[in-house]
Amino acid sequence: MLDRKLLRKEPLKVAEAAKAKNEKIDIDRWLEADSARRTLMLQIEELRKIRNQLSKAVSVKKRSGENADEEMAQSRETGTRLSSLESNIADIDNRLSEMEKGFPNIPDPDVPLGGEENNVVLRTWGEIPEFDFQAKPHWELMENVFQPEAAGRIAGSNFILFRGWAAKLQRTLISWMLDYHIESGMEEIWAPFVAKKESMTATAQLPKMEDDMYKIDRDNLYLIPTGEVPVTNLYRDQLLEEADLPVRLCGYTPCFRREAGSYGKDNRGLNRVHQFEKVEMVRLEHPDRSEEAHEELLNHAAGMLELLGIPYRILLLASGDLSFAAAKCFDIEIWSAGQNKWLEVSSIANFREFQARRGNMRYRPAGGGKQQFIHTLNGSGLALPRLIISLVENGQQADGSIKLPSALAERMGVEVLR
RNA sequence: GGAGAGGUGGCCGAGCUGGUUUAAGGCGUACGCCUGCUAAGCGUAUGUAGGGGAAACUCUACCGAGGGUUCGAAUCCCUCCUUCUCCGCCA
């Protein structure tokens, strides 16, 4: 949600931002409705004032036993006029807030314009592995432990079924990553894996992503598409003290995505699935410090890949590739040696006050003064399937076995998976 | 799933037989005073949002959310959300 004052003062800026994000919005229609609303509001407040005065007069007269019929009649008449104006303004309010929910966040000034092709590679880390044999994709290397046909029988296509070492590897990674975050001072959250409409709206999955989410109609719940939703919503409608900031959280959740219309392209094996596991990092930050917190989250996430020895690169997303709610976003991509391409394994975004406004998340400044919206940030730390792809494909040996990085070998109890 | 009780300003909490409460009181917080001592006491201020005014100030809305009744609703009625207690069911 954007500040109404900003919409009034700089409608052009908002319109340009939406265009940069390829969102269609009609700011003129909003401005029109907003000014109609304010005119109406003045009239309504005036009528309410009159009615309040009449009510008080009635009250005083009745108490002293006088007749108040005249005031009551006037008040009734005022009330009739009021209720017609009030129903008008309610309509306008609905229209305004519907429109506002569809206004995307404004990209930061340092975000490059344009589509995905304008993403900027900020840096690359690690050596791309070379093999003296033909490298295989993960679905071949994992034939015995990753069985999509079995998952299909259970839940339908594009779900994951792991068995044996793959199942254990996933569990071990989740636990290893959580420990890594906790050690850096984050608090672990275990939250619900379903969320209601209000929560989805606060973090801005709704209204835009409705069709990409699984919904349980009977109970009006959505399966969460990312841990961002429940973990950020932990602070929806909450007021923090400045001293409470920053709030640093992490948590494991599965993520459910319908991926409607994405069949056929790049979705073989583990590349794109309906349910995947993820450890999420969430940060609530003082507005003055969200910029550096953003970098910090990025480096923290990348640190895990360095411990695992996985080559990665950092992208600064261009405006057209930014999500609806993000002001700025870094993607981390890791190398897939069996498919010879980069895979997105983490998106780390600064939403500034966009989500905080929607979810009413504020803090009170230490020296007193007006309550302020906090800044929210989050990032994957990390998403499991693609991490597993990389570990398996990059660690493959000539005989089809997988050599584990030492950080994991210790936890898995073996150095080679076969 | 059934029955019952709640949801009031940052927190606690009164009001809930409709109108001098446009929310008492307490805690917390801020400033000041007093006290010579890591304490206490006293005074004043202190919800959020929007509008008007140079300013003192003033108007409007908000008592979980939304509707309704009424001249007038925190207070009455309805729907929903949510918390707790008991019963049932269940890993």
Image: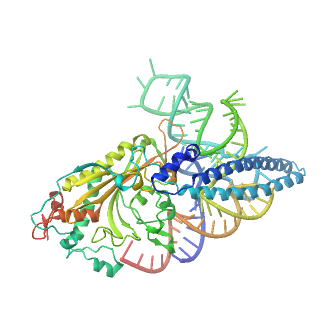
Q: Which residue is drawn at 50% across and 72% down?
A: A219
Q: Which of A204 and A261 is in front in this view?
A: A261
Horizontal relation, residue A35 to residue A223: left or right: right
Q: Nearer the viewer, residue A385 or A251?
A: A385
Percent across and percent down for residue A220 are: 51, 70
Percent across and percent down for residue A205 are: 46, 61
Horizontal relation, residue B35 to residue A143: left or right: right
| Position of B82 relative to B47 (above/below) | below
Q: Nearer the viewer, residue A360 or A349?
A: A349
Identify the coloring: rainbow
Percent across and percent down for residue A110 are: 39, 44
Judge whether residue A380 can be spotted in this image. Answer: no
Quadrant of the rendered image containing residue A403: bottom left
| Position of A48 relative to A278 (above/below) | above
Quadrant of the rendered image containing residue A127: bottom left
Q: How many labels does the image show?
A: 0
Q: Which of A411 and A416 is in front in this view?
A: A416
Q: Residue at x 30, y 68 (%)?
A: A266
Q: Which residue is drawn at 67% across and 51% down?
A: A37
Percent across and percent down for residue B9 are: 57, 47
Judge whether residue A396 can be spotted in this image. Answer: yes
Quadrant of the rendered image containing residue B25: top right
| Position of A240 relative to A416 (above/below) | above
| Residue placed furthest toward the bottom | A153
Placement of the C terminus of chain A among the 4 image quadrants:
bottom left
